[in-house]
Image (cartoon, rainbow, N blue to C red):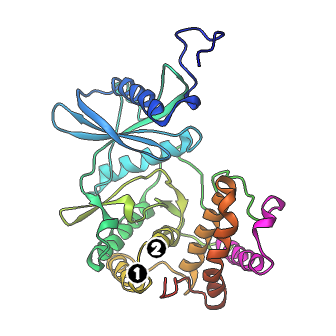
């Protein structure tokens, strides 16, 4: 309905638009942002809009890129600068094949763009396009061996790399490390726990916090990807290429591996996990020693990921929290008694 108090040509608030209307406005902003780069755009199209909004861009000389419009509040400038610094270092010093950040005409790698109807500046970055399909479509043992080697190559490089001045100081030294509201065990969520499962989740939390304290008292911290699961890797002509370095931070190799193996266990049948993990480890150990200091260390950090997800559900999908906690409690019970985090075979 037309609002007589609103000037006729004033755009509607972004939040009031339909998804199609929002995408139309974001597409206009993307087009304006591309004008800041030294390229002639032949076409660009929406890749996806989940948290960030991604567009595939093709230039008239045939090269392809990805333009990322960052969701407000999702990451900081410091996070984005860390991502850029590491990607540029990888491009200069390795053939790993990670995306290469592209500068604007002014030499900036992070562009803050605005457009009519979008009053909060949107953080834009342009990266080279990586061809291929998501590795998640081809989770075979040979490919997991290649994935293990890819992790080892990234860890070997970052062990010897000195980041530039001003690089992020963010560390993944606890379950929640990005200023998320920590509400999982507060009074606000007490009714989501039954008397039986609350001690299970609290016991898991204590085990994970102890593992963090033990790990971060040791040397060996380095820059890690920390979200390099199988669908952040492209498979092209038999080779793997890593993507999505938004979570670049300081940490330890075992944390990097734990994140990836947690997502792997969730996405494959129970009987496939052990052979795929063994193949990953074989690939990793072809370049570096396996970084697990004790037998249950990786699984403990995988439990940390489960705690992070549960806290996210508590913050964003409160109506599903009780079911979420109940459904996963048996896995945590087995972990607390065995030190192993595995899906039961009937799953």
Residue 1 position, x and y percent, is 59, 19
Q: Does residue 176 show up?
A: no
Distance from the alpha carbon under mark 1 to that under mark 2: 7 Å
Residue 174 position, x and y percent, is 66, 64
Q: Is 297 on the left-hand or right-hand side of 181?
A: left
Q: Residues within 10 Å of mark 2 (few under 14, many from 20)?
A: many
Seen at 35% across and 26% down, the residue is 31
Residue linked to disc 1: 277
Seen at 75% across and 75% down, the residue is 202
Front-lying residue, 192 or 98: 192
Q: Is residue 115 above or below residue 334?
A: above
| Residue 161 drawn in magenta | no
Q: Which mark is residue 261?
A: 2
Residue 230 falls in image quadrant: bottom left
Seen at 23% across and 26% down, the residue is 40
In the structure shown, which secondary structural element does the residue marked by tag 2 occupy? helix
Residue 118 position, x and y percent, is 52, 25
Residue 97 position, x and y percent, is 28, 55
């Amino acid at each position: 309905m037309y609002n007589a108090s609103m000037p006729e040509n004033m755009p509607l608030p972004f939040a009031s638009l339909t998804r199609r209307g929002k995408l139309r406005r974001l597409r206009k902003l993307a087009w304006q942002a591309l004008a800041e780069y030294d390229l002639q755009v032949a076409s660009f199209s929406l890749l996806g809009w989940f948290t960030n909004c991604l567009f595939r861009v093709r230039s008239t000389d045939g090269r392809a890129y990805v333009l990322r419009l960052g969701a407000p509040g999702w990451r900081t400038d410091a996070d984005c600068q860390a991502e850029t610094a590491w990607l540029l270092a990888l491009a200069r010093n390795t053939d790993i094949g990670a995306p290469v950040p592209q500068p604007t005409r002014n030499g900036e790698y992070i562009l803050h763009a605005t457009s009519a109807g979008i009053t909060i500046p949107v953080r834009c970055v342009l990266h080279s396009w990586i061809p291929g399909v998501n590795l998640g479509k081809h989770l075979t043992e040979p490919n997991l061996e290649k994935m293990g080697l890819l992790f080892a190559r990234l860890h070997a490089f970052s062990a010897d790399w000195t980041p530039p001045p001003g690089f992020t100081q963010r560390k993944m030294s606890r379950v929640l490390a990005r200023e998320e509201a920590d509400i999982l065990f507060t009074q606000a969520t007490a009714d989501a726990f039954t008397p039986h499962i609350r001690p299970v989740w609290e016991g898991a939390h204590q085990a994970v916090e102890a593992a963090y304290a033990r790990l971060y008292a040791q040397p060996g911290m380095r820059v890690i990807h920390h979200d390099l699961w199988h669908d952040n890797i492209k498979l092209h002509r038999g080779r793997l290429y890593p993507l999505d370095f938004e979570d670049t931070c300081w940490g330890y190799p075992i944390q990097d591996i734990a994140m990836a193996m947690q997502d792997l266990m969730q996405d494959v049948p129970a009987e496939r996990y052990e052979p795929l993990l063994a193949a990953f480890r074989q690939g990793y150990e072809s370049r570096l020693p396996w970084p697990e200091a004790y037998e249950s260390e990786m699984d403990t950090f995988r439990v940390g990921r489960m705690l992070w997800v549960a806290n996210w559900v508590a913050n964003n999908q409160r109506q599903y929290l009780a079911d979420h906690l109940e459904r996963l409690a048996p896995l945590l019970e087995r972990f607390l008694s065995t030190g192993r985090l595995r899906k039961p075979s009937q799953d």
